[in-house]
Image (tube, rainbow, N blue to C red):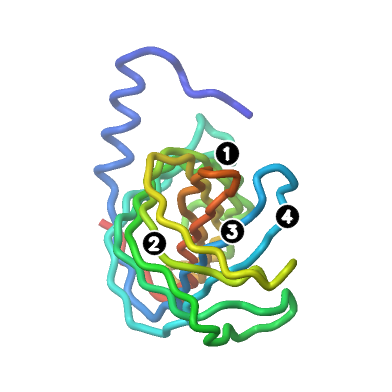
Amino acid sequence: MLLASPAWGDGIEAVHASFSRAYVDIGIAGKQMVLDVSDSATQTTQGELQTEMDIVPFLSLGTAYSYFDASNWGYNFTFSISPFSIDKQLVNENDSDPLDLGTSAKGYFFYASPVFFYHFGDKDMRGHSLKLGIGAGIGYLKAKGDIVYTRSDGQRHKFDISGGAFSVAVLMEYRYRNWLLRATGAGPVLSQGGYDYQFMDITVQMGYSFFF
């Protein structure tokens, strides 16, 4: 991976350029929230709470992607803060629809992360392009509720957790000129009491971009 110049002036100029080239996306989006509970020692998933996928219109403002010199490697930033409420649970790994098992979780989350990606195709918005990226950053998770261990012994586990957390993010974005198909997943991962609680905010967007 090529690295940007470490000079302070160049770094400030790069940040300014990134935030001065903004765009507005408009279209439809599918959104889903997932809370996965795993055993910290074995990294084995015990249960998974999910919301159903909601299809809604969206309007969002973003900053332009930045690149390292003339390479196809680049980065952008993703962040979100939101309350959540989940009252469905995935029973089997191959199921597509979560079920009502009487379990639920409520709380709120925050994450902020740079996402580093590789760009395939045209950068000039005149043809097809594809970006694949991954990132890590900081987050916060507060969640209270219960979950059934559907992947192991079927016990009901109650939790009341909060704290600063590590966050992860993934990106897939396909564009043809100003048309886009973007899938993102990001959220905090909090370890407490021998369990890992991974919250994932998943969004799939189809729309059109207006660049400034």
Judging by the rendered image, the residue that carries numbered circle 4 is: 44
204 and 22: which one is in front? 204
Element type where label 1 sits in the image: strand
Choose mark 1 or mark 4, whichever is in front. Answer: 4
Q: Which residue is mark 3?
A: 37
The mark found on residue 144 in the picture is: 2
Asked if marks 3 and 2 touch (Cβ < 8 Å), the reply is no
Where disc 2 sits, the SS reads: strand
Query: Which amino acid is tagged 4?
Result: Thr
Residue 101 pos. (x, y %)? 55, 84
As measured in the structure, the alpha-carbon distance from the residue carrying label 2 to the one carrying label 4 is 21 Å
Looking at the rendered image, the disc whose residue lies closer to the viewer, 1 or 2, is 2
Residue positioned 51% across, 40% down in the render: 136
Residue at 30% x, 61% y is 82
Name which quarter of the figure residue 138 lies in. Answer: top left
- Which residue is label 1 attached to? 73
Vertical position of residue 38 compared to residue 53: above or below = above
The answer to whether the residues at label 2 and label 4 have Cβ atoms under 8 Å apart is: no
* Circles 1, 3 touching at the beta carbon (< 8 Å): no
Give the spatial CA distance, label 1 vs label 4: 34 Å
Quarter-of-image position of residue 150 = bottom right
Q: Say whether disc 2 or disc 4 marks the residue closer to the N-terminus.
A: 4
Q: Residue furthest front?
A: 155
